Amino acid sequence: MRYRRAPVVIESRGGWERPFCGKASTLQSVEWIQSPSMSEPVVISGIGPISAAGVGIEATWEAMLAGRSGVAPVQAFDASDFHCSFGGEVGKDAFSVRKIVPKSYRKATKVMCRDIELAIGAAAAAVEDAGLVTAATSEDAEPTIDPERMGCHIGAGLICSDVNELAAALWPSRGEDGNFDLHHWGEQGMENLTPLWLLKYLPNMLACHVTIVHECHGPSNTITCCESSSALSLGESMRVIERGDADACLTGGAESRLNPMAFYRQCCTGRLAETSPDEDPSGILRPFGSDARGTILGEGGGILVLESSECLARRGGRGRATIDGFACTQSFDDDGFGVSATSLGDAIHAAMHSAGCKPDDIDAIVPFGSSIPAIDAGERDALHATLGDRASNIPTICTIPYTGNCTAGNGAIGLCVATAALCEQTLPARIHAGTAEGLDAGPCDSMSHDMERILVTSCSQGGQNTAVILGRVRS
């Protein structure tokens, strides 16, 4: 039994769900009801982050232990005329989609935009980390998991078209006065676009290509909710596995806004930090800092392999973390800065309730930590409202200083890193050029830390909020 009622939807797991449609202040009084659910939690068995910090969890984790940021001046296009000219790019030497896909599929890379390429790379890294055999890893060997029982849910952005491709079509669409003419566009301009042009930029093509490459014939879906897309996709995959419609799913998200059109739009929102070309990129991002001045865009994301406990045991796989709690809420946001501490707090509270844990059980937090003052303030207030006095002392793991804000892929990076932290029982170094207010988010080196549960949050530009609680798997 599931409940979905507007305007606020809260979902959770662990055998408990509830309807909620009202003011967030009524949260504590809502009666929880038990619903059919799996007795065993869904398990994360593979993680595949891809970002400026590295491709795959090993490279990413090594960079974060060393405190090495991937933020640098943008190389993908000339960003010198923008008030922000820095970004987190995946290095050309570190990743080539043609080297990852099977030879029989390389022709399809011609209709892959950057976002699709990143999703393909992340999925390959996750499948390898999970030790799975799929159609992509071996065309002859039997797949580890029945393709009919393998789902795929990937968060995506509203992809911007390539400027050069559009220019080639728009230029001949001018009328006699030199201005754009819709009639000429229909008659001549569109002829300059390749017939498969649209297939490069549809958001659902990330999941489409990943499912084809790895032969995932189970339930598939795409979620486009900005920074919350990845965690919402994880929640979707978790539900699919819980209700028995799949044994495993590839889930997560990826996006690149390091192109002129997307970059310009974000500059117009006032979310990006003003930078000078010669400044040290490690000093720009200051999550929860009193002197924070905005965020930096990145490209990347992550794919995770989710499995039922039964499926994992049957194939003798390694569990990396359990999904102990999940919840999502929707808050009103008309300007990209309207993070509701109450609404995000509702999601955190519901996730803890579903995980059966209290504030004392949370050992680390992976927050959004955007370095946008208004958003940081809302997130900090939500954490204090739900975790109480402990919020100031629970160590945080901030990923954006390493990768930039990878928007639809950002939450997946946080989930991958949180999983690695649980496995290694280690907190990576925090990059921060100042001091953080109200949270343990200031600069520090990597260190050992006993952790049983980690809270991962996201709050998106569209007002969607998520909270995920991951649990440690003991061997």
Image: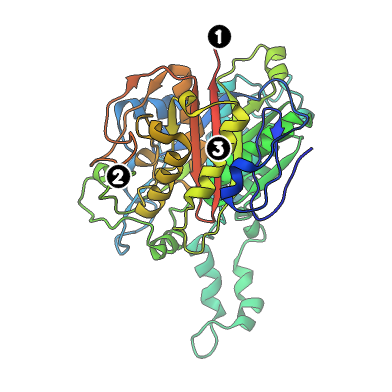
Label at residue 286? 2
Q: Secondary structure at mark 1?
A: loop
Query: 412 or 347: which is nearer to us?
Result: 347
Using the image, determine if residue 448 lies above or below residue 246.
Answer: above
**Gap between marks 1 and 3 measured at Cα:** 29 Å
What's the residue at 67%, 24% (across, down)? Answer: 307
The residue indicated by pointer 3 is 349
- How far across and down, in percent of the image, does residue 142 sit? 74, 19
Q: Is residue 215 visible to us here? A: no
Amino acid at pointer 2: Arg
Task: Tell us which disc is closer to us: 3 or 2.
Answer: 3
Q: Earlier in the sequence, mark 1 or mark 3?
A: 3
Question: Seen from this angle, which residue lies furthest top?
Answer: 475
CA–CA distance in space, label 3 to label 2: 26 Å
Report which residue position mark 1 lands on. 475
* N-term-proximal mark, 2 vs 1: 2
Q: Which residue occupies the foreground of this view, 135 or 123?
A: 123
Mark 1 crowdedness (10 Å alpha carbons): few <14, some 14-19, many ≥20? few
Task: Name the residue located 24 percent from the left edge and 40 percent from the top edge.
Answer: 435
Residue 163 in sight here:
yes
Where residue 148 sits, quadrant-wise, is top right
